[in-house]
Amino acid sequence: MIYWHIFLAFFIPGILGYGGGPSSIPLIENEVVDRYGWLTVHEFSEMLALGNALPGPIATKMAGYIGYQQAGVLGSVVALFATVAPSMILMIAMLGILLKYKHSTQVKKMTQLVRPAIAVLLGIMTVNFFVNSVSTAGSGYIHTIIIGIASLLLLEKWKIHPAYVIAGALVYGAIFL
């Protein structure tokens, strides 16, 4: 039964997560934290931070880790397949339709309307992480604010590559947390 739960936990976000990793992360969090209770919010945020530091798609890294954690190598394989299967199936099925109507105003409007929904989902997840850092680490919210402001300045003002900013945040966390 665990393999079926792992499959559903990653297949459903794979179907609903239009836009890739950023839109799938809150959906995966809902499944593995709220629905199945495999991870706490704190564990999920740590896994997400580590996964973002590694190259490649975030959803597959999270699926592989959680699947392995719950059911070993086979659990990891099931989770990885469940993560990529919806995209693969839908991409093949919808490619012909999208190519046929790619200049349609309705298709262009649909794409523009999805972006704010993704921003709201990411905002909710950020607030949840911040609230969790306040409640669990005592002064963790101060470190969260420091890392957030420093990251904003490094990325936007000084145009530092995101990989260096992530590495710096990991070093900061290792030293101070």
Image: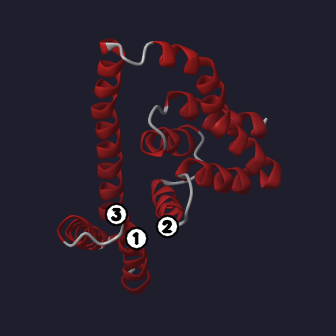
Q: Residue 127, labelled with which disc?
A: none
User: Which color scheme is applied?
Assistant: secondary structure
The quadrant holding residue 79 is: top right
The residue carrying mark 1 is 166
Circle 3 is placed at which residue position?
Answer: 133
Query: Mark 1 is on which residue type?
Result: Ile
> Which amino acid, by three-letter code, is at mark 3?
Ser
Residue 2 image position (x, y, % from top left): 76, 40
Q: Closer to the N terminus: mark 3 or mark 2?
A: 2
Callout 3–callout 2 Cβ contact below 8 Å:
no
- Marks 2 and 1: CB-CB under 8 Å? yes
State which mark lies toward you, 3 or 1: 1
| Residue 92 picture location, percent across and down | 64, 24
Alpha carbons under labels 2 and 1: distance apart: 6 Å
- Of labels 2 and 1, earlier in sequence is 2
Q: Residues within 10 Å of mark 1 (few under 14, many from 20)?
A: some
Q: Nearer the viewer, residue 143 or 151?
A: 151
Distance Cα–Cα, label 3 vs label 1: 18 Å
Q: How many marks?
A: 3
Q: Position of residue 28 (x, y in %)?
A: 52, 42
Q: Which residue is mark 2?
A: 53
Q: Quadrant of the N terminus?
A: top right
Residue at the (49%, 18%) spot, across then down: 98
Q: Secondary structure at mark 1?
A: helix
